[in-house]
Amino acid sequence: MTKKLIRKGKGSSPPRVPKKKTAKFLLILSVLLSLSSLTLSAEDAREKAEELAEQQRFTEAADILLEWLTVNRENPDYFPTLLMTADLLPDVQRAKDLLEEELRTEKDRARRYEMLSRLALLFELSGDVERAQRSYELAAFIRDREKDFASFYRSAQLLLEMGEYDRAELQARTILGA
């Protein structure tokens, strides 16, 4: 009797799984494992980026965060991670591009203000005074300009540098009159 069971595959040896099912299972398993490695939590991604930044490896740190941003667009930690990424990017142009791209689709006023303020500084650092002034001015108007004197004041200073004295004076009077 045992000889018959063994010959029919019902004895001690495990049942054979068809090769196609095994291949599909392994493919699904590998896809799931690769996706789980991509979906680091924002906190884990930021911690890893901070470690790399402490080692002066800013490009690698920013790349980790950029990778996280592409996969986790709907995550509540997306915006703080975006700002951290822009701060870590050693290439000012890449940081400007990242923030400008997000600014086009962002509707939240507080987030738009944060991005415009950072963009203004990046434009100023790269020598683009006109775009810096415009970004400061937009930031001042997004928030109530009476509350955001710093952006409005910096906009007026840049207008002076550009030789637009009338507009600079108007902004300065607005600040003083508030």
Image: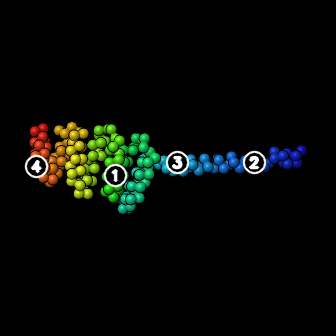
Of the residues tagged 3 and 1, which is closer to the observer? 1
Q: Which of 47 and 85 is in front in this view?
A: 85
Task: Indicate the secondary structure of the residue bearing disc 4.
Answer: helix
Q: Residues within 10 Å of mark 4 (few under 14, many from 20)?
A: some
- Inspect the image, locate mark 4, and give the three-letter code of the amino acid beneath it: Tyr
Residue occupied by mark 2: 16
Foreground tag (4 vs 2) = 4
Where does residue 44 sit, x and y in percent of width and height? Answer: 44, 50
The Cα–Cα distance between marks 2 and 3, rounded to whole angstroms, is 30 Å
Label 3: element kind? helix
Secondary structure beneath label 2: loop
Question: Where is mark 3, residue-wise?
Answer: 36
Q: Distance between the residues labelled 4 and 1?
A: 30 Å
Q: In this view, does 125 lie to the left or right of 163?
A: right
Q: Residue furthest bottom?
A: 56
Q: Which of marks 3 and 1 is nearer the N terminus?
A: 3
Residue that numbered label 1 is attached to: 97
Disc 1/disc 2 C-alpha distance (Å): 55 Å
Q: Can residue 83 be seen in this view?
A: no
Q: Where is residue 75 in the image (x, y as percent from the top left)?
A: 42, 42
Q: Which residue is drawn at 21% across and 51% down?
A: 130
* Mark 2 or mark 3: whose residue is earlier in sequence: 2
Disc 4 to disc 2, C-alpha distance: 85 Å
Kindly tell me whether residue 156 is visible in this rendering: yes
Residue shown at the point (12%, 40%) measured from the top left: 174
- Residue ID for mark 4: 165
